[in-house]
Amino acid sequence: MSAVLSEGSAGAIAAYRASLRRRRLVLGVLAVIAVAAFLADIAIGPSALSAADALRALFDPSSATPLSRTVVWQARLPPAVMAALVGMALAAAGAEMQTILNNPLASPFTLGVSSAAACGAALAIVLGLTIPGLPARWAVSGNAFLFAFASVALLQLVIRFRGAGVETLVLLGIALVFTFNAIVALIQFVASQDALQQLVFWTLGSLGRTQWDGIALVAIVLVAVIPFSWRAAWRLTVLRLGEERARGLGVDIGALRFAALLRISLLAAVAVAMVGTIGFIGLVAPHVARLLLGEDHRFLLPGSLLCGAAIMSLAASASEMLVPGAVLPLGIVTALVGLPVFILLILGGRRRG
Amino acid sequence: MNGLTLAGVTAGYRHRPVLRGLTCGPIPSGCVTALVGPNAAGKSTLLRAIAGLVHAQGSIRFGDRELIGMPARERAHHLAFMPQALPQDTGLSVIEALLGAWRAMPDGMLRGSEAALLNRVGEVLDRLRLGHLGMAPLQSLSGGQRQMVALAQAIIRDPPLLLLDEPTSALDLRRQLEVMGLLGELAREGRTVIVVLHDLSLAARWADCLLVMNQGAAHSFGPSETVLTPEMLDEVYGVEARIEPCSRGGRTLLIDGVSERAMPG
């Protein structure tokens, strides 16, 4: 059955091949942008170090002054690396969440991951309830991770046991959000002034606490999880055509959703545990990637990773520049800077479509 | 021989059985079998039960294999199911949708080179005259065009058993005939084609066999000439009808009105 194709089909397939080349190019450009944004994040900072000196200290430490070496390698590099990694984790989680919930407004935090993490953090900060045996430095992050991961695991269990669909999942997630918010409010009500301030600062999201072991943890989770997302790329792509259709094509939706939620909860929980709640990246980065690359997940997933890293690095730079002399909490910046960009993209995309 | 034999098939949804011990067959390979019957007779449920999308009991044998209890990944090699719902709004192009239908198959990532697969996509596009739409995003297509894409997705894997739920409901007259002709061709190539049809005239004219369903059971099964009778239409559909010879050969179905007797339910 290797008949000669008609002009229309041959033309369409040639156009498809061209679109593959174009999208590979877009991925390359995104990678360059992500690296540039990362370098800009290192070059820009509150201390009086010129951008050129900062980059020289990064690439050629022996020729830089000890002071600039210290500033770059100990003060600027860890938060910059963390920003890029967390951006990737949230964007990858957001892309998968939007696909499995079949909702472009979904984000890694849709099902209550961030509320659960805040609840865990509140318990640690205000009431001192922590996981036994964990070093004090890790207490808040440990709690946040445990709660974030456990909340999604609980949802998983319920839908697995009841065989419920997407709507039930979302409704239960919303119920969880309100439950955790109520508990956090209760804890805030009884908290001391000091603890309250600490908790509020934690929930705003910040890179200030970054340590290399935390970076290693996020990196390990990313490296462990992303290959599985990649393997599921085609099944996720087909899910975009509708659940019933995907099932008709032999995709085990239950297993696909279970595995995706597991990946999402790992990525989102580790991100929120390390840097607090940083909204918007997980919503916007997949959108940008989708506008640029389409819905084929072989491109959408890596595109989301790169967009997430780039947007986070830019937001981190902005957080150091917006108010001279102060570093704003990153969560505020991602929302402030991300929102206009997002609205422009949506309106631009509408016009084209 | 790739016939499909159903024995005592019971299936349905929570607290609501739809099929009640349906027995039928063998539904032969090499011909198009239309599944017809009034609303809520269980047509879609039967198709979904064969496809493994609803829990079923009893026996569904395809050739010498039992489909009930077969893991989804193995079942996907034997059959393709086209649901009634049209593909939803998505930015995926027609070509991507077809590639996905192949690649999403269990172990599909490993089979065949990209070039060979694209060639196969081109053949299916040509067979359904969709070539000019190859790069169009699904969300820009009309209902009928989406239905054609859904059909293309079902046939691209070339499965021996094709299950299609109302593949012509959104199509204009000419496309309806083209699709039914194509299904006949696919059947002649040795496949078993089972298709739910709402339009009895279309079924009578184009299907080789009819399986008439009523209230979750098989009412009658056989060549359309023997199955499609005024008595059946009265009994199953509750209408008074005539089957008259057509001036150009073949037979036409004329519906005169509702039957006198009261319908159950």
Image: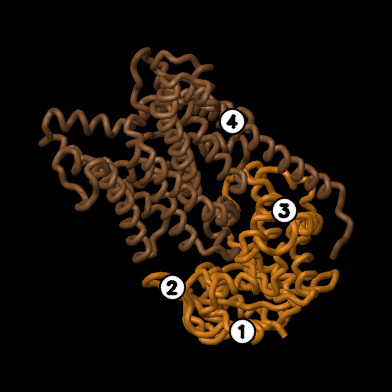
User: Mark 3: which secondary structure?
Assistant: loop
User: Mark 2: which secondary structure?
Assistant: loop
Q: Give percent across and percent down for residue B222.
A: 68, 83
Q: Work out whether disc 1 and disc 2 sit on a shared chain.
A: yes
**Label 1 crowd (10 A; few <14 / some 14-19 / many >=20):** few
The colour with which the image depicts chain A is: brown
User: Mark 1: which secondary structure?
Assistant: strand
**Label 2 crowd (10 A; few <14 / some 14-19 / many >=20):** few
Q: Which mark is residue A281?
A: none
Q: According to the image, label 4 marks what residue?
A: A349
Residue depicted at 44% across the width and 52% down the height: A263
Q: Chain of mark 1?
A: B
Q: According to the image, label 2 marks what residue?
A: B265
**Label 3 crowd (10 A; few <14 / some 14-19 / many >=20):** few
Q: Work out whether disc 3 and disc 2 sit on a shared chain.
A: yes
Which amino acid is tagged 3? Asp
Q: According to the image, label 1 marks what residue?
A: B65
B230 and B40: which one is in front?
B40
Residue depicted at 54% across the width and 78% down the height: B70
Q: Work out whether disc 3 and disc 4 sit on a shared chain.
A: no
Residue depicted at 40% across the width and 31% down the height: A79
Using the rendered view, name the quadrant where residue B241 is placed: bottom right
Q: Nearer the viewer, mark 1 or mark 2?
A: 1
Q: CA distance from mark 4 to mark 1?
A: 50 Å
